[in-house]
Image (cartoon, rainbow, N blue to C red):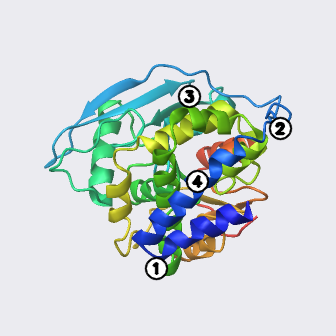
Amino acid sequence: MAALLSSLRLAANGPREVLRAATLVAAWLPNVIQARQPLASLASPSAEHMPVTAARFVDARAAGLAPITMAYERHGTGEPVVLLHGIGHHRRAWDAVVPHLIAERETIAVDLPGFGQSPDLPASVPRDLPAAVAALGAVFTALRLDRPHVVGHSLGGLIALRLGQAGLARSVTALAPAGFWTPAERRQAFGMLAAAWCGTRMLPDGALERLSRTAAGHAVLTGTLYGQSGLCPPETVLAGLRALREARGFTATLRAGRASDLFSGDMPDIPVTIAWGTCDRILPAHQAERALARIPRARLVWLPGCGHVPMNDAPEPVADLILTTSRSDVAGAGKPR
């Protein structure tokens, strides 16, 4: 695992190092297939996951923009909660969390444009945060959602905060939101993500599937993302890797993420929770303090032992903090707990 992390960190040094890191990873991973220890002993027997269901599609058009189409799933009853995934992921990122929400909330998990089953943005639509907020506002209208609660992870967390800022969200829960980095931290995060994307594209699907079902391969494939990789079922790992490999909007979204001041200005007086895994290797946990400095009324919650994707590391605590935030009528006190 240390060798993998070292090779991925090389990618922060520029495009050549991204390719070098991806090549090293792709060359090394097939050797791991020889470690045939099954993963069944590592998987959590009590983990709940949503059954795979067919996507529904919604067409929406924001003022001044070309129409877009987004894939989504809707489950449960109660006040609506929109779930936004991170870069290179898809709506199934929330599968382990949704079962803990649907008794009290209607969940709407979406594939952002260019990810999962959603078509990429039309060429005329800017790939920036104002356009993303306007497009999602139009999607909310098309789905008859009046200021839903919004939950986002990484890129989705940043978008969720911007939706709250625009007055389109009743509450916001942001898990390791993007955008609160230094330039060096951004380069490292983008380099690691780009190397992982390149690596999935270099390996045949059969190799990815075999790797996801062995203990050593599972740890290699998920170690940079999860704090407790053994809790993530092989099917979820494989679906996530395929989503990353097939993400049509990946490189353009990375380029757009180089913009400065991704989040600035005031946040309306709505409940906001920022949660961060203490073992996040992609966006280190100290970035949470910068987020809190920008949004001082937010509640900061640490997720001990969780990596960058806490939805799989700790689905029940994540669901609890979503429910707590969505039940609140007042902004948080800003103090971590």
Q: Mark 2 and mark 3: span between their CA atoms? A: 35 Å
Q: Amino acid at mark 2?
A: Leu
Q: Which mark is residue 37?
A: none
Q: Amino acid at mark 1?
A: Pro
Q: Amino acid at mark 4?
A: Ala
Residue 287 picture location, percent across and down: 60, 73
Q: What residue is pinned by disc 1?
A: 183
Q: What residue is pinned by disc 2?
A: 42
Q: Secondary structure at mark 1?
A: helix
Residue 332 in sight here? yes
Q: Is residue 59 above or below residue 227?
A: above
Residue 166 picture location, percent across and down: 35, 57
Residue at 48% from the left image edge and 70% from the top image edge: 17
Residue at 39% from the left image edge and 34% from the top image edge: 145
Q: Mark 1 and mark 3: span between their CA atoms? A: 41 Å
State which tag comes first along the sequence, 2 or 3. Answer: 2
Mark 4 closeness class: few <14, some 14–19, many ≥20 residues within 10 Å? some
Q: Mark 3 and mark 4: span between their CA atoms? A: 49 Å
57 or 252, nearer to the observer: 252
Mark 1 closeness class: few <14, some 14–19, many ≥20 residues within 10 Å? few
Q: What residue is pinned by disc 4?
A: 27
Query: From the viewer's perspective, is the residue at label 1 or at label 3 nearer?
Result: 1
Residue 233 picture location, percent across and down: 71, 34
Q: Secondary structure at mark 2?
A: loop
Q: What residue is pinned by disc 3?
A: 78
State which tag comes first along the sequence, 4 or 1. Answer: 4
Query: From the viewer's perspective, is the residue at label 4 or at label 1 nearer?
Result: 4
Q: Total label count?
A: 4
